[in-house]
Image (cartoon, grey):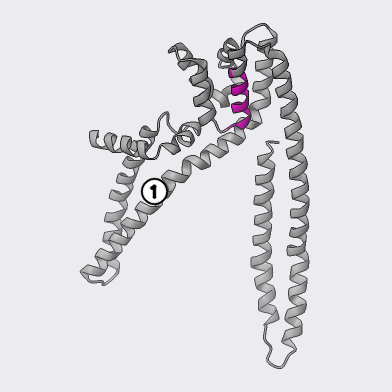
């Protein structure tokens, strides 16, 4: 166990750039803890799969010793490669997905924060009060960091610098940087918060217009592929089939177009539209 902890700490030091994704996605509270858990899961997976594969290869296939050893070593290398790929990419995927959720809830956070400012609380006290609202449960990670670190005596600037690095929400990062500048300069926070609210909704409107424009272009391409392309293919196939050599079988080409190209285009269209709509946080 001590060896695994030491190995996890060394990996955390070498791959420190992953910290913002691991902590910001909510996977674990530290990078070393994430690597320690990953190493344990890798050992468990390898020790479970390799004996099963060894037995299957031995029983099912009449292979020599070197062939069996090659299969086992190849499998071990494949498991290692896939595990490393998952360890590196999973935090980034979860980080992006959590960013979408936070952006969807950001207007609520901005409204509650501005209400607390209007009630007379300063920026720091307003930040501490945010953790008491159930509507802001999605921001629990960031709000708990603020509360815990302030109680430990850390400066607001240090806390904000760390949170802007790990949080997947660009809007929240901008708000925290503005709060930090207000706290340092002693400005009246209300006009600044009102400006942030106006800027946020202008940006959302712009993103929606861009998304609608892109979806329109995507829809035209989808119609061309799904409706017009099979017709063109059928005409070409029928024409070439009349030639002496019969270069293309029209029936086979129509089957491929209808059962492969059209469903693939439909699925791609659905995924792209869903991704675009998610990216504007509607």
Q: Measuring 34% from the left and 39% from the top, which residue is drawn there?
A: 11
Q: Do we see residue 251 in this rendering?
A: yes
Instruction: Work out which quarter of the rendered image holds the N terminus and state it.
Output: top left
Which residue is identified by label 1? Answer: 84
Residue segment shown in magenta: 169-180
Q: Measuring 77% from the left and 64% from the top, which residue is drawn there?
A: 227
Outermost residue, front side: 185
Q: Measuring 74% from the left and 70% from the top, which residue is drawn there?
A: 230
Whether 173 is among the magenta residues is: yes
Q: Position of residue 31 (x, y in %)?
A: 40, 34
Whether 87 is among the magenta residues is: no
**Closest to the observer, 88 or 41:** 88
Q: Position of residue 263 (x, y in %)?
A: 66, 61
**Closest to the observer, 39 or 237:** 39
Q: Is residue 129 above or below residue 43?
A: above
Image-based side of 176 in relation to 250, left or right:
left
Q: Position of residue 246 (x, y in %)?
A: 69, 88
Q: Quadrant of residue 125?
A: top right
């Amino acid at each position: 166990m001590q060896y695994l902890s030491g190995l996890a700490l060394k990996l955390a030091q070498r791959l420190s750039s992953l910290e913002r994704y691991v902590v910001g996605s909510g996977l674990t509270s530290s990078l070393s803890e994430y690597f320690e858990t990953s190493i344990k899961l890798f050992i468990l997976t390898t020790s479970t799969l390799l004996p099963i594969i060894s037995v299957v290869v031995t029983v099912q296939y009449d292979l020599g010793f070197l062939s069996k050893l090659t299969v086992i070593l190849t499998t071990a290398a494949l498991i290692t490669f896939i595990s490393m790929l998952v360890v590196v990419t999973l935090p980034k995927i979860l980080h992006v997905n959590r960013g979408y959720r936070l952006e969807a809830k950001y207007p609520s956070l901005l409204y509650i924060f501005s209400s607390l400012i209007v009630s007379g609380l300063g920026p720091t006290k307003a930040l501490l009060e945010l953790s008491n609202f159930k509507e802001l449960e999605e921001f629990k990670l960031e709000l708990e960091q603020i509360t815990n670190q302030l109680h430990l005596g850390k400066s607001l600037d240090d806390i904000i610098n760390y949170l802007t690095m790990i949080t997947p929400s660009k809007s929240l990062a901008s708000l925290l940087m503005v709060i930090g500048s207000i706290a340092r300069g002693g400005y009246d926070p209300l006009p600044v918060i009102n400006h942030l609210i106006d800027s946020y909704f202008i940006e959302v409107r712009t993103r929606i217009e861009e998304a609608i424009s892109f979806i329109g272009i995507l829809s035209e391409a989808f119609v061309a592929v799904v409706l017009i392309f099979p017709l063109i293919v059928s005409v070409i196939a029928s024409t070439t089939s009349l030639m002496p050599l019969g270069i293309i079988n029209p029936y086979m080409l129509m089957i491929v177009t209808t059962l492969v190209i059209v469903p693939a285009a439909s699925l791609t269209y659905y995924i792209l539209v869903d991704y675009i709509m998610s990216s504007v946080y509607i």
